[in-house]
Amino acid sequence: MALRIVVMTSDRAEKWANALRSALPDAEVINHTAVDDYDKDGIEYAVTWHPPKGALAALPDLKAVCNLGAGVDAIMTDPAFPAHIPVVRLIDPAMTRDMSQWVAYWVLHHYRGFERFRRAQAENTWAPKGYGDPTKTTVGFLGFGEMGGRCAQDLTTFGFNIAAWTRSPRTLEGVTTFAGNKALGAFLNTTNILVGLLPLTPETTGLLNAKTLAMLPAGASVINAGRGKQMALPDLITAMESGHIAGATLDVTDPEPLPNDHPAWAVPNLHITPHISALTYPRTAAGVVADSIRTLMAGGTPNGLVDRSRAY
Ligand code: NDP
Ligand code: OXD
């Protein structure tokens, strides 16, 4: 019997199915959204992005799930999802590169105060203003995994100090490191531009709130591309209105999509992008997923295997 794979995503599902058919020519690839019902027997791998709750549990022969994104929170929060099924998150170098572009753009935006010039231009005003010293500016990464590590590496070109907050302690050349909840305050106290690249887990939910935002130095900027539920948006708005937080950019919000009438849209120097910081493209990611499936079939450990006990 041919290898059977199901694709579950509401985003470009047929494109994903075709890309996987090219990458795994001997497999039968079923597009979950294209058929009302399909024979679930013998389906060993599911390739998913935000699968409907309970859909994975309905596959009796499922051996593993490959996620079409880095964050696996949508799978981890499905109460019906069996605890023994391995999950592989996506590690696609093209996506990591794109995240680094987005982060560099917004770090430079806030560091150089470009919002001031945008506003001056809207008033036809030539208004030069100096900026700080990158060697006295710390860009602090909440999360220093695939994404955070690469973004930091690229940002060092611009002369910033880099700090990282992680779950497990680590020593990294040229990076001031902090680990665990006890070190969060010390990390935030010394961070001028905060970049959030954390997975959404019970520990990181609501991490950025009135209390933690107040730990940042006055005039700090906040950038988040992790997950919206990590940020108490009303608290960020209050901190920006008081002037404590000078600027912010969010690629992820709670709720998402952000409703048209949400007050966050109108906050000066609060920038919102619609979860586009690093898109997943079938042209690069299908090959990565195919490699993971081949590795799993051979009994190996694919890159990006999720530790179910940590939920990321
Ligand atoms: P990784 O798993 O490679 O890295 C996660 C990092 O977060 C690690 O450094 C980890 O610490 C740290 N971390 C996790 N939990 C905690 C905690 N409780 N306290 C402190 N540190 C913690 O993930 P990626 O870098 O690939 O991706 C990170 C997240 O970025 C994704 O989960 C997703 O939510 C988001 N993302 C968003 C995208 C977008 O388009 N907006 C695109 C891609 C990703 P340790 O090193 O100790 O394990
Ligand atoms: C991801 C995302 O987690 O795009 O990959 O949000």
Image: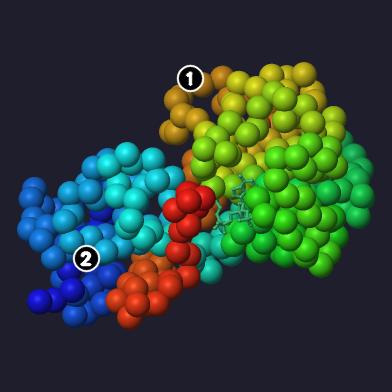
Mark nearer the viewer, 2 or 1: 2
Q: Which residue is mark 1?
A: 261
| 133 sits left or right of 69 in the view | right
Q: Position of residue 5 (x, y in %)?
A: 21, 65
Q: Is residue 211 above or below residue 283?
A: above
- Residue located 60% across and 21% down the image: 234
**Coloration mode:** rainbow
The residue at the point 33 percent across, 80 percent down is 298
The residues bearing labels 2 and 1 have C-alpha atoms spaced at a distance of 44 Å
Instruction: Using the rendered view, name the quadrant where residue 46 is placed.
Output: bottom left
Residue 270 place in picture, x, y as percent:
65, 32
Q: Amino acid at mark 2?
A: Glu
Image point 51% across, 50% down: which residue?
310
| Snapshot quadrant of residue 16 | bottom left
Mark with earlier residue (2, 1): 2
Residue at the image position 70 percent from the left and 40 percent from the top = 181
Are there few (<14), some (14-19), or many (20+) residues within 10 Å of tag 2?
A: some
Of residues 61 and 75, the one nearer the viewer is 61
Residue at the spot of label 2: 44
Looking at the rendered structure, the kind of residue marked 1 is Asp
Looking at the image, residue 54 lies above or below residue 63 = above
Q: Is residue 116 left or right of residue 50?
A: right
Question: In terms of secondary structure, where does tag 2 sit?
Answer: strand
Along the line of sight, the residue nearer the viewer: 171 or 268: 171
Residue 12 visible somewhere in the drawing:
no
Task: Tell me if residue 30 can be seen.
Answer: yes
